[in-house]
Amino acid sequence: MTDTNALRIIPAEEAFAVPEQMAEMRKVVENWSGGYDPDIFLWEKMLSGSPLTRRLLDLDGERIQIMDEAGIAMQLLSLTSTGVQMFDPDTAVAVAEVANDRLAELIGRFPTRFAGLATVAPQDPARAVKELERSINTLGLNGLVINSHTNGEYLSDRKYWPILEAAAELGAPLYIHPRSPTPLMAPAYREDHLEHAIWGYQAETGLHGLRLITSGVFDAFPKLKVILGHMGEGIPYWFYRIDWMHDMTKSLDMVRAELQMKPSDYFRRNFAITTSGVNWDPPLKYNLDVLGADNVMFAVDYPYQETHESVNWLRALDLPADVKAKLAGGNAERIFKIKAPAAA
């Protein structure tokens, strides 16, 4: 039987903010004149001074207290969505640099409690590559995070491929974190606020992941590793139909990139997923079955989800000890190159 108290737990999608990001987003919100926008709506909540605001900005107080109470060894941190992707390029680059410096400084103070993903400004691919190189080679961060679309565009667009190429060459895993659907898509979700985490996030981010596959990105960069949260943003459940339709629709003269493998094969080879925000046994067991135990990681999605609920669910899972250890933190250590603690 697994000793649940001995699990090394490393949740892999844990958000933070820095004051500079908050200050620049406040300017964006205050100057917004484009009517309802789902990302602006969310940022109004995050800037409101609520407990959510406090928890995003807190790095070494309540955050560590909650980690200790729940038995979390380490958090893998990423700058909260929408990162720097709603700023003009110069502002985005500047805020990304500050956020990465702050993250590296925090890890330096608490090397056994935090690891982190770099923020880059996709709206300026050349400078994004430079910042990624600095973040990995100089700051020692563990990968990068991009919050899905940037100005309604996806990383499958070839102008963003230099970022993907650099991530592959650096061995830097890319976490694609959700944001609200693109401006073209958002109105269809507007009624009942379906554009947020209830449906819009996974629909938008799942589309992004599939576009990476069908665009041929992984034939060009076979070593690129992409992580999707929320049990894979829906993609693994559709493997059969995606593969079948991708092959069948060639006969309908639909124009798609020629791929070397089936779409699901790329997902199994190039993707890993986290459990963030889905503390439920059936989808976990399904994904362990179709993806394998090496490709699924635990995450809380702090502070947007409840830490204790997530950890209690993890501890109660009826899984073999080796699988549970991989899920809890072993896969995160391997994929994100997080150093294991020194032997006592």
Image (cartoon, grey):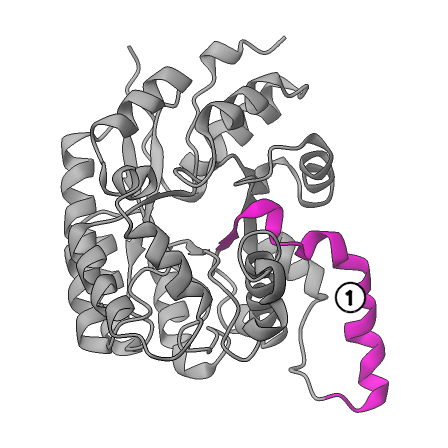
**The one of 14 and 292 positioned closer to us in this rendering:** 14
Residue at (41% x, 64% y) in the render = 39
* Whether residue 66 can be seen here: yes
* Image quarter of residue 105: top left
Q: Is residue 197 above or below residue 84?
A: above
- The residues colored magenta run 226-254
Q: Kindly identify which residue carries mark 1.
A: 243
Residue at (74% x, 52% y) in the render = 237
**The one of 176 and 197 positioned closer to us in this rendering:** 197
Residue 245 belongs to the span the image colors magenta? yes
> At numbered mark 1, what does the secondary structure look like: helix, strand or loop?
helix
The residue type indicated by label 1 comes to Asp
Residue at (49% x, 77% y) in the render = 183
The spot of residue 14 in percent (x, y) is: 38, 41
- Please identify the quadrant where the C terminus is shown: top left
Main structural element of the magenta stretch: helix, strand or loop?
helix
